[in-house]
Image (cartoon, rainbow, N blue to C red):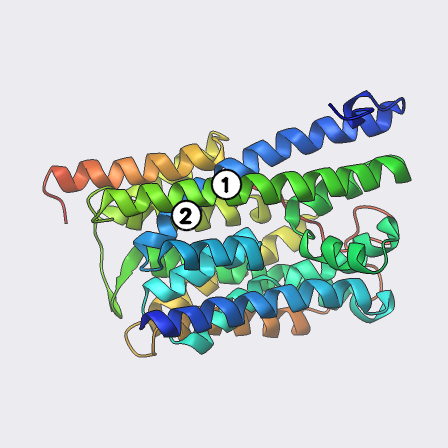
């Protein structure tokens, strides 16, 4: 993406997210507080995050790739199981991938 | 010195809410460093990174936006992914607006500060005064620290150079996993199971579509899958799997 296109993406996406927040404060409560809407929103959030985990970890430029990132994700999952805080989880994953690459793993 | 610090407010519930707000703000603000670093690693510059932290101000959406940019997605895919991840903020607004009773510019400011953390702290408080203190202190605290640490992370990331050498590309997947993790458990076992199944299916679908669909589309397809499951999964009709009276969506604070 060109620098200008990234600016468009940044500003348009920010406008959409902010508009959603404002709408939440303005629309009548009954319209959005239906069980099905609430449940679906929770599922969409989880599905998007899970898909992003997969795409960020196992794909490069439109191809499936298995490399040091997979090992890093396993380390992150173990850290989360042990209730490590967010920053530590991310640091451990980065350190794992950096170490493996230093050792010659792609 | 302020005339009377809120930390010395005579109301113990308000004092407790302010203390909670400060610790949540510090914990959340700190991981702004990882956002800033990942953002420049994904190819955004420092001003673009800060525009996201200042204007979008919603962690999950920001990580998603830079993730899709980094993967080579189109502008539309960036907007759709970040927008869909930000949809829950709209539901939080429905929940907190009546508790805050703000109007005019304060209402607009409250809307901008409506995120997982401010909603979670506000709705956990026992009294109306503590609810308002919890919302505003957490919202403002996270905003200031998140932006400060985003800037630090972006400058650090810029100075580091090749992101792969430092494993920053692997850190992105870990960041999304950490955001997802607390959503995979909950009080209601049936709901939790559905969330887990949808999460696994979403990951598999996104991987399966990656070789054949344009960048950004596999992630959106996962969201579409969740919408279908959410609308088909009838469940217990009127009775929402509620945590408290008038239950809205439960905000999840990352570890």
Residue drawn at x 69%, y 39% is B138
Callout 2: few (<14), some (14-19), or many (20+) C-alpha neighbours within 10 Å?
A: many
Residue B148 is tagged as: 1
Query: How far from the left and from the top, in percent, is residue B223?
Result: 53, 69
Q: How many marks?
A: 2
Residue drawn at x 33%, y 41% is B156
Residue A50 is tagged as: none
- Taking B96 as reference, is B115 left or right? left
Dot 2 corresponds to which residue? Answer: B36
Residue most toward the left? Answer: A104
B148 to B231, vertically: above or below: above
Q: Secondary structure at mark 2?
A: helix
Q: Sequence order check: which comes first, mark 1 or mark 2?
A: 2
Query: How far from the left and from the top, in percent, is residue B13?
Result: 85, 27
Asked if labels 1 and 2 share a chain, the reply is: yes
A78 to B74, vertically: above or below: above
| Marks 1, 2: nearer the viewer | 1
Q: Which subunit holds the residue at mark 2?
A: B
Q: Report if residue B43 is visible in the image.
A: yes
**Which of the 4 image quarters holds residue B127?**
top right
Report the front residue among B33 and B64: B33
**Which of the 4 image quarters holds residue B94?**
bottom right
Report the front residue among B206 and B32: B32
């Amino acid at each position: 993406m060109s620098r200008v296109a990234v600016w468009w993406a940044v500003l348009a996406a920010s406008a959409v997210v902010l508009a959603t927040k404002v709408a939440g404060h303005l629309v009548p409560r009954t319209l959005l507080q239906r069980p099905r809407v609430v449940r679906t929103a929770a599922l969409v959030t989880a599905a998007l995050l899970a898909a992003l985990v997969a795409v960020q970890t196992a794909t490069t430029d439109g191809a499936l790739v298995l490399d040091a990132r997979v090992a890093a994700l396993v380390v992150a999952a173990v850290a989360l199981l042990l209730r490590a805080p967010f920053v530590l989880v991310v640091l451990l994953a980065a350190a794992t991938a950096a170490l493996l690459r230093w050792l010659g793993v792609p | 010195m302020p005339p009377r610090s809120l930390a010395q407010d005579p109301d113990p519930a308000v004092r407790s809410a302010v203390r909670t707000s400060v610790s949540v703000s510090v914990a959340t603000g700190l991981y702004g460093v990882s956002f800033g670093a990942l953002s420049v690693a994904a190819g955004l510059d420092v001003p673009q990174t800060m525009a996201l932290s200042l204007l979008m101000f919603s962690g999950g959406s920001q990580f998603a936006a830079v993730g899709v940019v980094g993967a080579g997605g189109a502008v539309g895919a960036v907007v759709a992914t970040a927008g869909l991840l930000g949809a829950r903020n709209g539901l939080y607004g429905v929940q907190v607006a009546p508790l805050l009773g703000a109007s005019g510019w304060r209402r607009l400011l409250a809307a901008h500060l409506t995120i997982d953390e401010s909603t979670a702290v506000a709705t956990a408080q026992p009294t109306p005064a503590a609810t308002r203190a919890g919302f505003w202190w957490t919202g403002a605290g996270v905003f200031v620290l998140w932006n400060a640490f985003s800037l630090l992370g972006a400058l650090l990331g810029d100075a580091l150079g090749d992101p792969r050498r430092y494993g920053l590309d692997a850190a992105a997947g870990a960041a999304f996993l950490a955001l997802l993790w607390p959503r995979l458990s909950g009080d209601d076992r049936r709901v939790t199971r559905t969330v887990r199944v949808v999460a696994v299916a979403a990951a598999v679908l996104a991987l399966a579509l990656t070789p054949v669909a344009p960048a950004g589309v596999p992630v959106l397809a996962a969201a579409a899958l969740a919408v279908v499951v959410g609308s088909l999964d009838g469940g217990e009709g009127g009775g929402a799997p509620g945590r408290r009276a008038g239950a809205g969506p439960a905000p999840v604070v990352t570890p």
